Structures are given as structure tokens and as C-alpha cells.
Amino acid sequence: MTYAAHRSVVVAPATSQIERIEVRAPGPGELLIQVVANGLCASELPAWSRGPTDGAPMTLGHEPVGRVVEVGGGVEKIAIGDVVTGRLTDSFAELIVVPAEDAVVVPPGLSFEAGIGEPLGCVVEALRRARLDTGDRVAVVGAGFMGLCLIQLLATSAIGELVAIDVREDAKRAAFGYGASAALDPDEVAQLADAFNVVFEVSGTQGGLDLATMLTRSGGALDIVGYHQGARTVDMQAWNWKALDVINGHVRDQRRLTDSIRRGLDVAASGRIDYASLFTHRYALGDLDRAYADLRAKPDGFVKALIVLTEE
């Protein structure tokens, strides 16, 4: 049995189109999901900008939330009608078939925005890997979506001072609103060299990496959360001399990420963070190119785009 559906594919540089597809029924250990919405991830911006490299249409999307419409054999913990999320690829589509073991059931009461688990799980994983202690001075370099999510989680912890650093005025205002004790421009932090026990680099830029190195005190921890999509240089002398613990906050282990998604959604369901408010701009699937363009330009107030496929 197959199902008719539509999906968005990239057909040329910065150019997407909707195509009709046939989606198969789920096999053993799989789920068929009707996608309600997707988060738009900056990690896919270069692929969209570049377009297909082999001439074949390219599928993107990996931050979906949706409702289970059919369950394959052997799946016991997820049922038809459950709302699920996870790192589930090629998800800019109305229907997708995914491994059940990679899906996380969204806790009752969460909105679909708050149920988009993949980016939340990435932030939670970076935080789990960090070495934090009561009263630590903590800095977050980069107050985009990931940085603001991290700031919310840190603001509920037992750390001491929490300083956010970003070049954009709207990002600094948001960081302060989400619990940072101070929100500064990079030009304002020279006096804070070697001041922080833990620094999270969430900018994904060379400048942010250099600044995070400068801010971390001797014996402190530098947690690299930003997604660096090009070659970088590091001040190895500073890392060495300061005896820094340098942590790669990224996760590629699917099971580990799935566990962090589940933990993050439990925090969101508790009401201690306002995760849904980080999705500031909504777009239809047919407006995907406009969404990517806004992600690249970051108009005032832009934090995270939500691609809506089904109004619930």
C-alpha cells in the first residue's frame, strides 16, 4: 500500500519546489508520520544556497513534529495518534516513514512548536557534557536560537553569573529577557578575560571561538556548541597554557540524542522554560525559500523559523 503526499525539494541554488510523491507503508519497526511542522536549521543553509551537486532534486529537513498514522510490526511503545518528534531526516514532506527507535513521544500539553525536539536535544546534550558547579560564572557566546535555548536552561540551574554575548541588539534583549544576568557586545568584554568557569561557544564563527577562548579562565571548560561549517584555527597556546577542558558539544550518536530530546521535552513540559516562544516566524511549505532567505538575513526579532505543513 502507498500514500499520496507532497514534499519540498531543492532543484537549483536557493530554489525549492513542491513535488507529488508516493509514500510506502511502514515496515517492521517503523512509523508512518503525518508531519505537522518542522524547525528550520541553519546547518542546512549552505546546502540550500548551493543547490544539488549531482543534478537530482535534494531533500532537506530533520526537525519534524507530527502525528503517527500507521505503525509497523513489532512497535509496542508508540501508537497511532501519538505526537512524535526526533532527528528524522527528509522531513519537509507531508508524510514520512521513520525508524520507531528514533522517535520520541511528545509529552501531553506541549504545543507543536514546543514539541520540535531535535534542536532542543542538541542543546541539552551540550549542557549534559559541560562541567558545571554551583555558583559558576558562565558565559554564552552567541544568542541565536541555540544560545537562547541554552540560556533558558542555564537560568534554571544553580550557577552564578550568566553573561550572554552577541553583536545583535535584538539578540541581547532576548538573552536578558530569558534569564541572562547581563547581555553584552563583544567589544564590551575585554575586561572579562579569564573570568568564567564555563564558556559555551554557540556562534559557529571564528570570532566567537576566539572570544570564548579569551573569556575562559585557567582550568575552566570551553564547550563548543556552535556548528562550524568551515575551517577554523584555534589558539592552541592559550588552550594549552590555561589547561582548558575543551568539550565538543555536538552529538552524532542517535541513541544519545534521542535520550537528550526526551529529557529536554520533559523540561519544556514542566514549564520551567518557554521553548515555544523561540519559534518567532512561521512559513508554509511552499514558502521554504523565503524562510531560508530570512534565516540568512535575520530580520529584527528573528530567532527560529517554523515550517507549517498541517494546521492543528
Image (cartoon, rainbow, N blue to C red):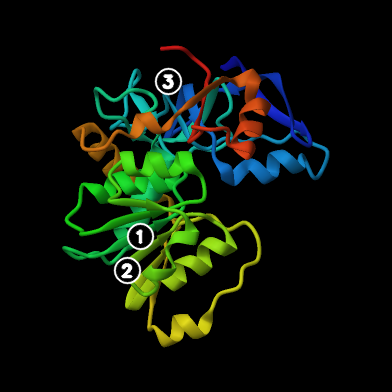
Residue at 24% across, 48% down: 155
* Residue type at tag 3: Glu
Classed neighbour count for the residue bearing mark 1: other residues with Cα under 10 Å, few (<14), some (14–19), many (≥20):
many
Across and down, in percent, residue 18 comes to 69, 20
The kind of secondary structure element at disc 1 is strand
Residue hosting label 3 = 70
Number of the label disc, if any, that sits on residue 196: 2
The alpha-carbon separation of the residues under discs 2 and 3 comes to: 50 Å
Across and down, in percent, residue 105 comes to 31, 31
- State which mark lies toward you, 2 or 3: 2
* Residue type at tag 1: Ala
Q: Can residue 115 be seen in this view?
A: no
Across and down, in percent, residue 117 comes to 38, 37
Q: Earlier in the sequence, mark 1 or mark 2?
A: 1
The kind of secondary structure element at disc 3 is strand
The alpha-carbon separation of the residues under discs 1 and 2 comes to: 7 Å
Across and down, in percent, residue 144 comes to 47, 44
In the depicted structure, whether residue 265 falls above or below residue 280: below
Classed neighbour count for the residue bearing mark 3: other residues with Cα under 10 Å, few (<14), some (14–19), many (≥20):
some
100 left or right of 93 in image: left
- State which mark lies toward you, 1 or 3: 1
